[in-house]
Structures are given as C-alpha cells and as structure tokens.
Image (cartoon, grey):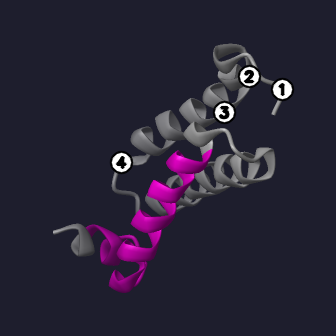
C-alpha cells in the first residue's frame, strides 16, 4: 500500500525502509538531547523530507500537498520552540 504512494510520486519502492529508519533515528536524536550536532541534522532531515514531499505532491498534482505543508511548518515550529521546551541551548 505505501509502496503505491511512493511509486505514484515517482520514488522507488525500496526507499520506504531507509526513510522510515532515518525518521525513527531522527526522533531519537532529537529526544535524547545527547548531541547538538545530531539534533540539527535530524531537524534538517525532517525539513528536507517535508520540502521534497511538498514538491513531489505538487508535481504529481494529487492534491495531498497540504499534509506536507503542515509537516514543514510543524518541523520549523518544533525547532524554534525546542530550546524553550527543554530549557537548553543545544
């Protein structure tokens, strides 16, 4: 089922598993607060993933770009307010 979404957007089906693993590792990197560098890479990864999804949905003209826009703004707001929520400067 998910592979159909990926192929509809022009991505190969095998990309599902590396993408899912990297997203899980990104959440772990952000929540663990062990490394500021890993946290920034995770936020950058989520930002680019959302931007690429928005571009793919726009090109495919399937009308599902709203979810990508929400993900993009959620990523940006999460990064802005992360330091305030956890009281860190990392």
Mark sitting on residue 64: 4
Mark 2 lies on a secondary structure that is helix
Alpha-carbon span between mark 2 and mark 3: 13 Å
Sequence-first tag of 1 and 4: 4
User: Which stretch appears magenta?
Assistant: 5-29
The residue depicted at 51 percent of the width and 64 percent of the height is: 22
N-term-proximal mark, 4 vs 3 = 4
Q: Which residue is mark 1?
A: 89
**In which quadrant of the rendered view does residue 80 lie?**
top right
Residue position marked by numbered label 2 in the rendering? 83
Identify the mark at residue 48; answer none if there is no mark: none
Res. 68 in view: yes
Real-space Cα separation, disc 2 to disc 1, in angstroms: 6 Å
C-alpha separation, residue under disc 4 versus residue under disc 2: 31 Å
Q: Quadrant of residue 82?
A: top right
**Residue pictured at 33% horizontal, 82% vertical:** 13
Q: Main secondary structure of the magenta part?
A: helix
Indicate the position of residue 84 as horizontal and vertical percent values.
71, 14
The residue depicted at 65 percent of the width and 52 percent of the height is: 42
Give the side of residue 66 with respect to residue 75, left or right: left
Q: Position of residue 7 (x, y in %)?
A: 32, 78
């Amino acid at each position: 089922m998910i592979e159909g979404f990926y192929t509809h957007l022009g991505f190969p089906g095998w990309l599902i598993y590396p993408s899912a693993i990297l997203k899980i590792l990104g959440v772990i990197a952000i929540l663990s607060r062990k490394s500021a560098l890993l946290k920034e890479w995770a936020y950058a990864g989520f930002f680019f993933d959302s931007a690429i999804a928005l571009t793919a949905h726009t090109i495919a003209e399937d009308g599902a770009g709203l979810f990508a826009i929400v993900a993009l703004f959620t990523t940006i707001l999460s990064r802005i307010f992360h330091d305030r929520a956890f009281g860190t400067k990392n």
